[in-house]
Image (cartoon, coloured by chain):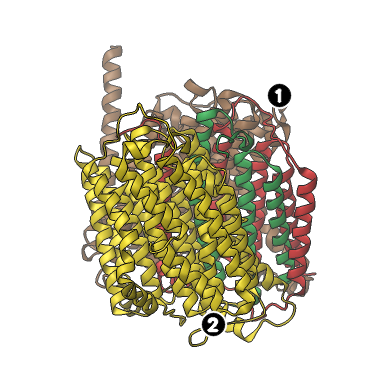
Chain colours: A green, B red, C yellow, D brown
Amino acid sequence: MIGLSHYLIVSAALLSLGILGLLTRRNAVNVLMSIELILNSANVNLVAFSRFGAGNLDGQVFAVFVIVVAAAEVAVALAIVLTMYRLRRTPNLDDADILRG
Amino acid sequence: MTAADYVFWVFATATVVSGAVVVFARSLIYSAFALLFTFFGVAGLYVLLGADFLAATQLLIYVGGILVLLLFGVMLTHRIYDLKLRTEKTQLGPGLIVAAGIFIIFANAALITEWPTVGREPAPTTKEIGRLFLGEYLLAFEAASVLLLVALIGAAMIVRRKKDA
Amino acid sequence: MEEVLRSLGLFKPEIALTAGLLLVVIVDSIGGAWRNGAVRILSIATLAVALGYAVELQVAGAQGAIFSGMLTVDPLGSFFKIILVLASLLIITAFTFRAARELHGLGQGEFHALILALTLSNLLLAGANDIVMLYLALEMVSITSYVMVAYLKGDRMSNEASLKYLLFGAVSTGGMLYGLSLLYGLTGTTSLPGIREVLATGVPGPQLALYLATLLIVVGFGFKIAAVPFHFWCPDVYQGAATPVTALLSVAPKAAGFGIAVRFFFGTFAVPVTGTWDLSGVIDWQLLLVVISVATMTLGNVAALTQNNMKRLLAYSSIAHAGYILMGIVALSDVGARSLLIYLFAYLFMNLGAFLVVTLVHLHDGTFDLRDYPGLYRRAPLLTLAMGLFMLSLIGIPPLVGFLGKLYVFGAVVNMGSGYYWYAAVGAVNAAIAGFYYLRVLKVMFIDAGNEDKPPLKLAFVDRAWLLFFAAANLLPVLFWSRIDEWARGAVVLYTGR
Amino acid sequence: MDITYDLLLRIFPALADAPSWVLVAIVAGLPALACFAFMGVGPVIYVYAERKISGFMQDRLGPMRVGKWGLLQTIADTVKLLFKEAIFPRDVDRTLFLLAPIIVCVGAFLPLVVIPWGARLQTADLNVGVFFVAAISSLSVIGLIMAGWASNNKYALFGGMRSAAQIVSYEIPAIMLLLVPVMIAGSLSLQDLVAVQAGGLQNWLLFRYFPIMPIAFVMFFVAGMAECNRTPFDIPEAESELVAGFHTEYSGFFFAMFMMAEYTEMFVISAVSSVLFLGGYLSPFPGGVLQTLGPLPLGWFWLIFKAWFLIFVMMWLRWTLPRLRVDQLMHVAWKVLLPVAFVLVVVTGFFVLLPETANGFLWDRWVAWPLTLAFVAFLFVVMVRALRWNRRRAQELAA
């Protein structure tokens, strides 16, 4: 029987994959994808808790807001990445290194 | 196992495997397209969890909006005739160890914790969620619209080329 | 419907800001040569009205949960609202386009709209009473800040700073979201008072998930207040952003972050008892915060010692100050909360003053480098004297406001008992370290030789007036301190109902 | 799913004793098979219709050779396409090249799941029906980008990017306009949307709220047409600029899949439009006349009739209007359709709240539908006269 823990483990797997992506990827768009994985893992958690644990719809509503926020974030993020590409012809984060000290 | 259980395994496998492709793929474009299957798998999990409205939202916004944006981002930040689009990966070893540690900790937490078990039978959620949006979560709903407005203004402002005083 | 109408009465500052934001966007899109002036006046008027409403709430001592428990209104929240709106108002009036060289020639409409949006989201964050609202407001603050940091779009540094800020912010808020989802799973509710009720009775079984949730939530707060080890973005962002944006970011989102942190740690992770709070559940977050706080102030101060860029120096200094302010949360008492309020109040004036001086020097000399500051005293005595005052205030020299802030914070920690004396001592040692780099700035400006051939800085009348204003704001509060103390004492009322 | 299940048990009561997995397989398989058959056969008819109609509009005969009036022409073409070699150019990305047509097809076929062919004839009466259609149709965007990318051909890539930009832009007004009928019906389920239009022609949503709904319908139809890349919105495959757009490199069966998806999408848009505005499977006569013919329900006939009529309109417009430029395209979406859609939604919201007009305006019953019909007829007459004038002019020139 599929229960809460199954979903939580899927979510944990997504979370750790997202973190792995953050740690290993150097391309800005790729890092954004990893962040989307993390947000999705949290959403799976919220919906699973809403179904099995809490028994109310608050989790699902929360997840809808998370999706909306993610959309806004990605829009701004891509605008910034595009500007970066325009300014120095690379989407790689390692090349973003003029601020230091 | 019931039919729903099989379906769960299909969606869960699709989600995790394509999530792994997102992270491990050598080519950026493969990561982006793998993300499609992750989003789709997650939407399938939502359906199994009785969250039909959320599943449709997931498809509409993640697949129709965010993923398209990301694809445009990929193509606009590369010379588009280069089919391979290799991206660099660094620190794969330490990263794997950290990620595995995190997975073990969180999976362990998920298994040993005594979560509340009130539960809620799957039932159509659209009406109820609509009511919550305009009732309990009215303020959050309005705040989200302000957030989208700000993101719209901000993104348009940032990418606009010419400086205009 | 009645709930909404009732709520709107206690929601006036935010309504004013929203209306102002929409008006600014509309006016800016209409176009015309007059729009820049109109937008500016409109924003100032909006913030002034919002400030008036916030003060009204404070005076009335309004309390309660509004919008079905999404937000709370209480004197503590009103205090934060006043500080947050005041910070934006000061930024718009004293800094921006006239004084900031980086912003010359850029569009004003979006800038003012963004400042209003940031203020609005700060107010929402400081009053959030539900984790949905908390997350949403946190992201609103963050996304608005990313855009503001990227405002100098042709500028590589601004672009890079915003990218770093965004990636770092998205990761930490993503982690926090995961923590919040665990918290929802453990308690079955999204309302902060509801969560407290569950936590007070204790979570059955192993506590690992609760620990993880707490840890992840602290990550989110830590990012917002730039506490170590979530501070990496801070110096880069402060350096890359336009100076008015930096000044605003160094005060407003940080204050809002502290506002929600107080609400979270006092109102949710603790049970209110008269005068003090008791820890609820088994999470010893006090210890966690002590560690973070000590690390934050030490690292901030030590790193600031070697900085030559004034913006980076002030960035590290603001990190260190976040460490001091955290002491007020750790104290977990009325005294602690009061000290936090007073410190933020003081920090607002001393930090904005210092940034104003940096902005003005950049306006005239085009440099943020401390090595270009020698001889400034001969060229602009008023400016230099004011800077001296701000620096002394940041160190905490009596009788300036900075001293009073530190006095309250250390007092609150000492009040906790002998077990925490070492903590206060660490704070004192840090204040001494901080003295080095603040005094170094003064030494460079007053004593060091150089730049003799450059002409004197001709400050505009408005700039002089603002310098005098900030100097007075640092100097004078001590005269009527009992009033301020009373105000802060009255403000430490946390509404913890639904 | 459950509707199919009920239907199945009514016809074959013996199946109730079968093991659950057999039932599940049948319940899931039958509608899928039906949809697939419809999808497979549909395009054959549409392509024939398209060629004939364009033939007549251009004063020629269209296909005439194979079979009587060329009836078998498209079947022959299909057979040819299926047996032709599918060429893979050397530098394409094979995985994505193969995956793209599949994704596009899935995106085109999945909405059929929720289209109601009758009160009980529907694969799944989803609670979020309309929303589901909107969500799924975004899937094909990804497929088009994928096809464009995998082809490793700049024209294909441009075509893919253009179509993605176009579909995403037109999706926004389309979804806003979806809200208008949804607000009136108070439900996202397509069954409920049809149910509020029961009772004959004058109750169709198109004829209610007189100035609002006709505008909403026309705009939704235009946005829908743009979403399936039909002329005048066929910039993504503009043959004079981009060879053939995203499917430049495709041939044989895979090309057929794109074609199938495109025509299916046309059908879906038309069917959804008729469900939302034209009463779906309801007959146009008051009192449910001809809703059933004896024991035979006619819902499917009415739906297909309305949908095919709209498809005919699409083909008609193809030969009437010239192709838009990219900037005009974006202008239409963002500066015309979207603001008007917003206004419509807000205005409809007000009117739905007013109790007197809960079922449309007072004048709707008597005035609105004749007016709308008269307007459509007027348009038709004008167009016919223009065509006649054209022909006469051509004859004069020839003489």
Label annotation for residue C277: 2
Q: Is residue D54 visible?
A: yes
In front of the other: label 2 or label 1? 2
Residue most extreme to the top:
D399
Residue D361 in the image, given as x and y percentages of width and height: 24, 64
Up the image or down, C379 lies above or below C341; here it is above
Residue D13 in the image, given as x and y percentages of width and height: 70, 73
Which image quarter is the C terminus of chain D in? top left
Identify the chain of the residue marked 1, using the numbered disc in the image: D
Q: Is residue D398 left or right of residue A66?
A: left
Residue C93 in the image, given as x and y percentages of width and height: 27, 50
Identify the chain of the residue marked 2, using the numbered disc in the image: C
Residue C374 in the image, given as x and y percentages of width and height: 42, 36
Q: Is residue D333 left or right of residue C135?
A: left
Residue visible at 57% across and 77% down in the picture = C269
User: Pointer 1: residues within 10 angstroms few (<14), some, or many (20+)?
Assistant: few
Q: Is residue C267 left or right of residue C354?
A: right
Task: Tell me the element at label 2.
Answer: strand
Residue visible at 65% across and 31% down in the picture = D150
Label annotation for residue D371: none
Task: Tell me the element at label 1.
Answer: loop
Q: Which residue is label 1 attached to?
A: D91
- Residue nearest the observer in this picture, D21 or D48: D21
